[in-house]
Image (tube, rainbow, N blue to C red):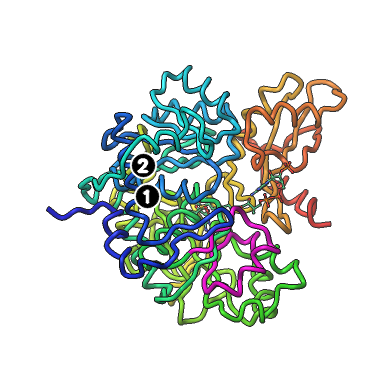
Amino acid sequence: MVNNNLYTHFAKNFLKYPKRDFLSSDHGSVKFENIHGETGFYVAMFSNIGISKGDRVVVQVDKSIEAVLLYLACLRYGAIYIPLNTAYTKEELRYFLSDSMPELFVCDPRNENSMRELANELKLNNVLSMNSRKEGTLFHKLSEVQSSSFVEVCNNDDLAAILYTSGTTGRSKGAMLTHNNLLSNALVLLDYWAWEENDILLHALPIFHVHGLFVALNCALLNVSKVIFLDFFDSKRVISELPNATVMMGVPTFYVRLLNQQSFNKSVCQNMRLFISGSAPLLSETFNSFEERTGMRILERYGMSETSMITSNPYSGTRVAGTVGFFLPTVSGRIVNENGEEAADGEIGILEMKGPNVFKGYWKMPEKTKLEFTHDGYFITGDMASMDCEGRITIVGREKDLIISGGYNVYPKEVEIVLDMIRFVKESCVIGLPHSDFGEAVTALIILKETTLDFEENIKLILNDKLAKFKHPKKILLLEAIPRNTMGKVQKNILRDQYKNLYLE
Ligand code: MCA
Ligand code: AMP
């Protein structure tokens, strides 16, 4: 029987360059020839603590080589990997854990006590903290076992990962991704971006999202490429590593920050073949300044957690600023106008698509899943786009009320729910406003019930416990009234227009 476990597709190439480093970080490295043996310990440990195929493994830890080995071990064992943003608070974790009910929860040692409390409350079986060697930690458990050679047999349709993406109702949905979803997308990107035998990837993204985990690492694994694995994005550090790399992927904020550094120039990029941008719109201004400074045109692509990559600018053809290129060869897509018809060239509509990369549905939300698909099986992205006569796509906006700040998604509803629960807040409205660094900045407009001194400080304190930092409003403004239309719906467009220069002046 053919094993469609994604791990087997990676592993069959490991011995092509056995001595090559896969990951090289400030804390150590792992060679391709050692991945199988190393992940074998995790696999044996899973078996030891009673994990079965299809069980969930929730992971909220800093970026590390061990975290990647854990991801690979989950694939190999047929467990479902659920990475979570390290910025999430205990309150947010409560939801993710109770929704996914993992058989294993791997947490950061800094939050170990409070995470154990939470896990006890939810009656989770196994909690292990990462990176410390005392009893009850991941490493202690690994030291108790011998490396196993086991690889689970998986069908194309078996789940590999669940990625939580926020929802317009304020409730996060777990996008279920199969082994084949991930494999098919990585394979097409390998080809479309013309990965070369000796490519070296500079990796400064977090690894709890599609971009840093699946787009970057899965491509590097399939290509047997070395990855310079930085703990986080720091522009000076990236500049110092660029001469050693050939490919980099980033959110637009990375490129804005690189351009803010005088030392970022053509000679630093002399070995670079490709800079890729995604997760948020790349401003034409950034694209043009980048080309002026380095002589290189950033390749912009577009995707979602539910689908991984959908479109991309071409590798060899013209990369056009402000556009996200063409549907990938494995994707069939269309733009549908408000009459439900396929839009004419240049007409704006909602982007819908099909393909082997489209997720299996939202975890435990079959009804919600149905609503996101058309009767003929296209996934409705909620992104507003237009397509020109050559098939080149421009994302012009979003139908969903979503803010993208530095590549992280923030659903205003989620922030509004928390603000509206505050004793002295009568009403709130959260919008995204143009921001030169983050692209968009989360901004709250509130009406107070009564004059409240230090309202801003008090709100910030409350938010600290409830919401990850990146969701916090960068500014909170007081309003007398929130504009509404005759149906009572808040007119966010009026507020966005009124305050459009708030962060730009
Ligand atoms: C950190 N902060 C943020 C953000 N990140 N606030 C808003 N938006 C953010 N993205 C907070 C910090 O907690 C801190 O708060 C303050 O802002 C300033 O932090 P700073 O040091 O400037 O930020 P940073 O730590 O340097 O992080 C910025 C960053 C990072 C490097 C842009 O956010 C990042 O790595 N973003 C990448 C996101 C990503 O990988 N997205 C892919 C999603 P305080 O000062 O109050 O403590 S996958 C996806 O979207 C789809 C599928 C796709 O197409 O790829
Ligand atoms: P996520 O929920 O994190 O998967 O975010 C997916 C959303 O990010 C998409 O639906 C788009 O709105 C947005 N996005 C990703 N890439 C781009 C891009 N290149 N240009 C504009 N928006 C993008």
As drawn, is 241 to the left or to the right of 57? Answer: right
As drawn, is 179 to the left or to the right of 275? Answer: left
Q: Amino acid at mark 1?
A: Glu
User: Residue 241 has which mark?
Assistant: none
Front residue of 391/270: it is 270
Q: Is residue 275 above or below residue 421?
A: below
Q: Circle 2 — which element?
A: helix
Residue that badge 2 annotates: 42
The segment highlighted magenta reads: 227-254
Task: Kindly identify the residue that appears in the image at 68 percent across and 28 percent down.
Answer: 419
Residue 398 horizontal/vertical position (percent): 55, 52
The image quadrant that residue 253 belongs to is bottom right
Residue 458 horizontal/vertical position (percent): 78, 26
Q: Is residue 116 magenta?
A: no
Q: Is residue 389 above or below residue 424?
A: below
**Badge 1: residue crowd in 10 Å (few <14, some 14–19, many ≥20):** some
Asked whether the residues under the numbered discs 1 and 2 touch, taking CB atoms below 8 Å apart as contact, a structural biologist would say yes
Q: Amino acid at mark 2?
A: Tyr
Determine if residue 388 is in view: no
Task: Kindly identify the residue that appears in the image at 68 percent across and 54 percent down.
Answer: 438
Front residue of 482/276: it is 276
Residue that badge 1 annotates: 38
Residue 119 horizontal/vertical position (percent): 47, 23
